[in-house]
């Protein structure tokens, strides 16, 4: 519920809207909407749908299912018992964040994503068992997404730091595609900085990364 509230507030900020303005546009009681957007009351399905329409979020504002919450909480509490469903639940949260990036500014997304990342990182440090590799891969993707958000927000130094860590983590899980994507994102950052030599260098790095699958 709090995760939904944080994402919805970020979407409001991106659209330049206040809670009062959203309540007026949706014909909802402002006190009710305020409780929802401050994580104090669960939204109705109708409100979730209405906020998605109002904010152009295309369904990316959604509540996690109780099962997903339970799996993730259990994984954090019992890192030696992480199963495939828990890894998939964390991957689903990251996928939703990526979709939301199309509707919400990177600056607004960063605080929400950073809080989620802290939970993922805690579990990644402690996870054991046959599904540890899968969780480490999700963590590596999360690091890359943090780098991408910082690049979009023009936090250049932070973007470079996160993307370098993403490359290292991709190597740790032996994922050439993920490593190449991190290099490509560094190229995107260099393009924003108007550094054409660096753009070319990072493109070539991505292209020649072992295990990557360059397009032809």
Image: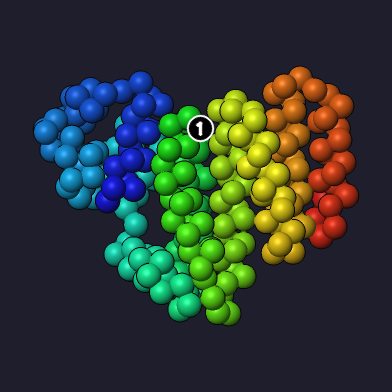
Q: In percent of the image, x 46 and y 44: which residue is there? A: 114
Question: Residue 35's spot in the image, x, y percent?
Answer: 16, 40
**Where 191 falls versus 49 (above or below)?**
above
Query: In front here: 114 or 34?
Result: 114
Which residue does the numbered mark 1 point to in the structure image?
106
155 up-or-down from 119: above or below:
above
Query: Would you identify the image quadrant in which residue 23 lies?
Result: top left
Circle 1 crowding by C-alpha within 10 Å: few under 14, some 14–19, many from 20: many
- Tell me residue 6's x, y (percent): 33, 40
* Secondary structure of the residue carrying numbered label 1: helix
- Compared with 173, 186 (above or below) is above
Q: Position of residue 115 (x, y in %)?
A: 42, 46
Tell me if I can see residue 96 in this picture: no
* Residue 24 horizontal side relative to residue 9, left or right: left
Residue 54 seen anywhere in this rendered image of the structure: yes
Q: Quadrant of residue 151?
A: top right
Q: Quadrant of residue 195?
A: top right
């Amino acid at each position: 519920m709090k995760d939904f509230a944080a994402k919805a507030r970020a979407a409001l900020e991106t659209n330049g809207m206040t809670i009062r303005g959203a309540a007026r546009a949706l014909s909802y009681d402002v006190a009710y909407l305020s409780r929802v957007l401050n994580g104090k009351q669960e939204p109705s399905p109708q409100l979730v749908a209405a906020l998605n329409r109002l904010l152009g979020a295309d369904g990316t504002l959604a509540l996690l299912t109780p099962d997903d919450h339970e799996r993730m909480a259990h994984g954090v509490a019992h890192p030696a018992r992480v199963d495939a469903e828990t890894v998939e639940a964390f991957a689903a949260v990251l996928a939703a964040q990526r979709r939301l990036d199309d509707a919400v500014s990177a600056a607004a997304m960063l605080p929400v994503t950073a809080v989620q990342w802290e939970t993922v990182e805690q579990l990644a440090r402690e996870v054991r068992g046959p599904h540890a590799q899968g969780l480490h891969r999700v963590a590596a993707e999360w690091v890359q997404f943090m780098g991408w958000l910082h690049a979009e927000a023009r936090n250049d130094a932070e973007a470079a730091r996160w993307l370098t860590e993403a490359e290292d983590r991709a190597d740790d899980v032996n994922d050439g595609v993920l490593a190449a994507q991190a290099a490509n994102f560094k190229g995107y950052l260099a393009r924003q900085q108007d550094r054409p030599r660096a753009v070319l260098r990072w493109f070539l790095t991505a292209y020649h990364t072992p295990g990557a699958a360059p397009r032809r």
